[in-house]
Amino acid sequence: MKQITTHELPKRLLFTLLILAVYMAGRSFLLYKVDSAAYQLDELNSQNIMISMISGDRYQYTIFALGIMPYITANLLMWMFMAIRGAEFRARCSPQKTERMTLLLMLFLAASFAVSRSGDLIFRESRLAPEALKMIAILEMTAGAFVIHKMATWNQSQGIGGQTPIILVNILDNLFSTLQKFSWETFQKPLLLCLVMAAVILVMENVLIRIPVQRVSIHNLYADKSYIAFKLDPIGVMPVMFAVSFFMIPQLFLRFVMWFFADNGSLQTIYESLNLTNPAGAVVYLGIIFALNLLFSFIMLMPGEMAERLQKGGDSIVGIYAGKRTKQYLRRKLLLLSVFSGCVFCLMMGFSLWLSLDGEIEPELALFPATAMILVGILCPLYREVKTYRKFDSYSFFILKDPKKRHIFEQL
């Protein structure tokens, strides 16, 4: 018998670093004939800073301009679709079919985002018509989104963190760029808010609400260690990350309506108020965070189906009858946690927006403390994954000196 060392953690870290190197290289390749000099003096507001965390480069003029946004949005829409169709539909739908549907949806979204983005691009002089340059840019951005989709998929199976390392790169890029723009005196209050928010999210990510479960298959000293666990923030910081993207939907809708009713003063007033420098816009933004927190929690955790799985397995929550009462109990518990975490998110972000509206911090830094929340929300699961692979590497494996068995082991 021979001892085998897997080196799983170093191999996965190396693969993830390779993916990030390719991503960083793609962020440096400009779209064909785009005029990068025209973007040098562009100012990014707080809304654009948040969007660029899941989009690509800071000015969105490279082949990776769309970033991870089409991939994440497609996955999110597929989760919602699968949740609405129910468990029976998911059981009939193979993983390959789901992956193909997600890919097609991602390509559709990428092409739509690319068309929208192409209208704001500035090109250098060329023999090609502006429409041809825009079409080339659309194809380049769509192809770039496809490459990012593949990199995120490969990293999920062979690296660490799936798509989160790409989001982490965008966050760090925004962080360093923003730090260079403002003085230390300007950053003192936002930095203090960042530290407070990071500490709160760290607690919410690591404190578990454990619901004890009686399992019919366990009748030993480990029976009392079986439980269902919910975090204080059941779905993490996803609502904060996506809130700005959803905040843009009413803006885009009003802009579309205003094309047909350009002289309508009421529509113009509503459109101008839907920004984060206006109290009405700030209230709408906080409402979106709260609503997304509830929506994502129930769609992704699915307490109803969780109760059905317990009943089918003959298991039950301690002190709760299986079936309808278990379903009601889990839904009530998840609702309370979602409302609590949603209120915490809104309170923290609302205080930052209030300071911005009151002139205590710069408007561009109104959502900067959200960076700390998202950063901690990303680093916590990454740390747990790295810790898991490190523990895996600490085990010693013994197999017979059989080349065929060794080959099978190495593939695993």
Image (spheres, rainbow, N blue to C red):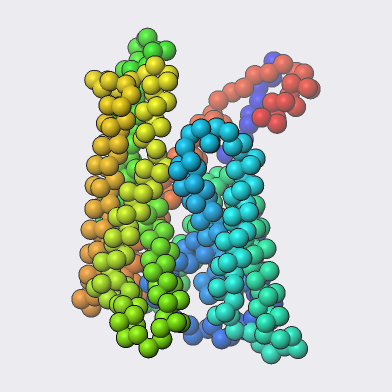
Query: What residue appears at the point 25 percent right and 53 percent down from the top-left corner?
Result: 344
Q: In the rendered view, tell whether residue 377 sits above or below residue 46.
A: above
Q: In the rendered view, tell whether residue 196 sits above or below residue 253.
A: above
Snapshot quadrant of residue 203: top left
User: Given the current orientation, which residue lies at the most extreme right position?
Assistant: 403
Could you say where residue 253 lies in the image, as x and y percent from the top left?
Answer: 42, 71
Could you say where residue 219 lies in the image, as x and y percent from the top left?
Answer: 37, 9
Regarding residue 324, the answer to whether it shows in the image is yes
Where is the N terminus found, in terms of image quarters?
Answer: top right
- In the rendered structure, the answer to whether residue 240 lies left or right of residue 410 reads left
Could you say where residue 128 lies in the image, as x and y percent from the top left?
Answer: 74, 85
Could you say where residue 249 lies in the image, as x and y percent from the top left?
Answer: 42, 67
Query: What residue appears at the point 51 percent right and 56 percent down from the top-left corner?
Result: 73
- In the rendered structure, the answer to whether residue 128 lies left or right of residue 68 reads right
Snapshot quadrant of residue 336: top left
Q: Nearer the viewer, residue 333 or 101?
A: 101
**Total numbered labels placed on residues in the image:** 0
Regarding residue 269, the answer to whether it shows in the image is no
Query: What residue appears at the point 72 percent right and 16 percent down from the top-left corner?
Result: 400
User: Given the current orientation, which residue lies at the most extreme left position?
Assistant: 358
- In the rendered structure, the answer to whether residue 13 lies left or right of residue 230 reads right
